[in-house]
Image (cartoon, rainbow, N blue to C red):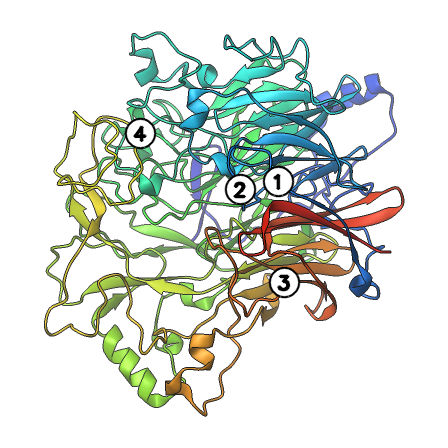
Amino acid sequence: MSWATHEGIQTMRIKLKLSGARTWAPRLGSATLALILATAPAFAQRLTGTENGEWRYLGGDVGHTRSSPLNQINGGNFSDLEVAWIWRGDNFGPNIDYFNRSTPIYVNGVLYTVATPRRQVVAIDPATGETLWTFREPQTIRHLRSPRQAYGKGVAYAEVDGRGVIYVTSPAFFLWALDAETGRPLENWGTAVPLEGFPDSGGLDLIPPLVSDWGRWQDRSATYDANYGIPRELGMVTASAPPIVVNGVVVVLVGHQPSYGQTRIENVPGDIMGFDAATGEFLWKFHTIPRPGEVGHETWHNDAWQWSGDMSSWAPASADPELGLVYIVTNASTVQTYAGHRPGDNLFGGCVLALDVRTGERKWHFQIHRSDQWNYDLPTAPILMNLTVDGEEIPALIQNTKQGLIFAFNRETGEPIWPIEERPVIQTEVPGNYTAALQSYPTKPEPVDPIVRDGLTDEFVIDYTPELKQQALEILGHYRIGGLYVPALPENHSNTFYNNVGCLGGGNIIPHPPVADPSTGLLYASHRRSCGAPSFMRPTGGVDDDNPDYAAPGAGGATPNSTPTTGTTVAAWLPGGFRRPTDAQDPFVSVTGLPTIDGLRLYKPMDNQLSAFQMNTGERSWSLPVGETAQVIRENPRLAGVEIPNAGGAGWSIQMVTGDLLVQTRALSEGTRQIVPDAPLELHGRDKLTGEILGTIELPAPGQYGMMTYMHQGKQYIVVQIGSIQTGFPGSLVALTLP
């Protein structure tokens, strides 16, 4: 059985015939057009990739496909590309930042992006790489203690009253509207911030509208200090993704510190807000943690809605302007590893949300996973394109997950394009904890890695030699094998097996977002296989009123790398338990996860992989390894004389579509200083239908996060985000073009 949720009603879905998408673009006078728009039904936009040689959004187009029809650069000349310029991010913050998470936009002949943890806005000449102007928010205490400072992914653009405007949200949680030509804050926009160095207009303090109707804020008696922001004992908030501007509304997305590093159960909710693009006027707010009387409130037991926080939307958003809908994905609630204080499925966590951009009203949602305790937040924007399924045209929304699942919906109605199963999962054994009984699995497309269906079953066990497989099976016999949603065990559990084991097929897709080609219906996803045992849970000892920052580990049970967090109450259980194997289990177990056999993993490796899915049918078109099998496998003495299939190499694959090409390179994983030597610094032009390499050039440093393309003065450019310590490049941009 499968379920779709629309307008608060949850109904069993039987395979339905969906109405085809319609497009409409007549040439009418403005008055006639306004009248028709007011009375006519909304039609989905075709969303065919970027237009006019521009790249107006982080993901290229408003549907976040990272696809462009530009074809001046093609398979026949790709190897002729030369470096046009390199823009370096050395001097835009107090420290050198070697990671560049911001994909530039290109509009009206200028590139715009952000740089470094200061999230300094930069305008760049697209032909020379010259910096045209910069904007830096004045320093505040709340910026200094802001989480996710370096996670700025870009800026938004809109035209207001005939002029271009750049919008950006800062780590300190301010919204700025800047003149696109000069970088100066707009006059008569927003509300003056009463802090030294701040301009009289052009900015908005986002904290007051976010917390205005939040009970814990209303109960406080202290005067608000805009320099300090939210007191630490109440919470912590920031922004990661840029806003998105749709139909005259700036939609602001809230971020938090990673909830898997928190020990406190209280925080600020990550509500979504809309502001007038022309004036900065506050328009609406959507509660990501439903209040009494709102849809989903019943999924929060123990009155946790009153004090639980996060439920952020730190990944970018996409939109369909014709439907007037903005599509947003969310993460988990505070203390992601334990849910005993917040029992219930916790809407709207782990959701795809469709909101009316003018009112903030929820049109539909789908909860992809319930009561997240695995860091399974949705980290990439929904991809929008039209599909033809069984002869019917469907306005589609496609959502990739960390788990390696691909969900496909009608973006107008929220109906799944193919049925979605609700599968029972292993339940928690941690006293007082809560886990959802069922989790969602799409029937189509297939997972990027089939291991995620049932976990590390026999077919996925290493089998280079019969002896290795037997040894691996013997070790795995000491574990309980599950799928994606294996819960952590208490450190003092009494099971006969040592620990639970689960497997991911997608991995952390933040630095390698999926892309799509609207002209062919192909979706491209980078992925790798990972299996392991969750950390054991240990009791914390409960309340720690005297130490609201809870910065150091101690008898209370905080993990050594726990971040100073918020609130007054420590979660009852946290990861960090340590348990020695019994004599019978030793040496078959590892105290840190799954053991290896002479450096070989117990499961068949599937490292850096690139797969293409034909979304019109839901079938995989092709899959290929990127890079070469790890040296520890290729040169392992246990495998001498054994033919080893290529399992892919280090890092991840990042890509985009331009013309008939899939442009692709190897990317760093987040936190990795440099890809190991098996990864040459190359950019490939691949046939987008087959994956075949048609041309290759060298890059000065490894790729990071994404790339983009544009046409400027008759020349097509490809810009790749690069950087690493080893190659001497900070977070930088390299532009390539034909001679």
Local packing at callout 1 (Cα closer than 10 Å; few below 14, some 14-19, many 20+) is many
Q: CA distance from mark 3 to mark 2?
A: 20 Å
Q: Earlier in the sequence, mark 3 or mark 1?
A: 1
Determine contact: label 2, label 4, CB under 8 Å. Answer: no
Local packing at callout 2 (Cα closer than 10 Å; few below 14, some 14-19, many 20+) is many
Q: CA distance from mark 2 to mark 4?
A: 33 Å
Q: CA distance from mark 2 to mark 1?
A: 7 Å
Q: Residue 363: x percent and y percent?
A: 54, 32
Q: Is residue 12 left or right of residue 663?
A: left
Residue type highlighted by circle 4: Ser
Q: Residue 13: x percent and y percent?
A: 48, 49
Residue type highlighted by circle 2: Asp
Q: Nearer the viewer, residue 546 or 475?
A: 546
The residue tagged with tag 1: helix, strand or loop? Answer: loop
Q: Is residue 693 left or right of residue 432?
A: right
Mark nearest the camera among 1 and 4 is 1
Determine the residue positioned at 36% across, 66% down: 455
Q: Earlier in the sequence, mark 4 or mark 3?
A: 4
Which image quadrant for residue 599?
Answer: bottom left
Local packing at callout 4 (Cα closer than 10 Å; few below 14, some 14-19, many 20+) is many
Q: Which residue is mark 2?
A: 97
Q: Nearer the viewer, residue 410 or 213?
A: 213
Residue type highlighted by circle 1: Gly
Q: CA distance from mark 4 to mark 3?
A: 45 Å
Determine the residue positioned at 53% across, 71% down: 648
The residue tagged with tag 2: helix, strand or loop? Answer: loop
Q: Which residue is mark 3?
A: 681
Residue 89 badge: 1
The residue tagged with tag 3: helix, strand or loop? Answer: loop
Determine contact: label 3, label 2, CB under 8 Å. Answer: no
The residue tagged with tag 4: helix, strand or loop? Answer: loop
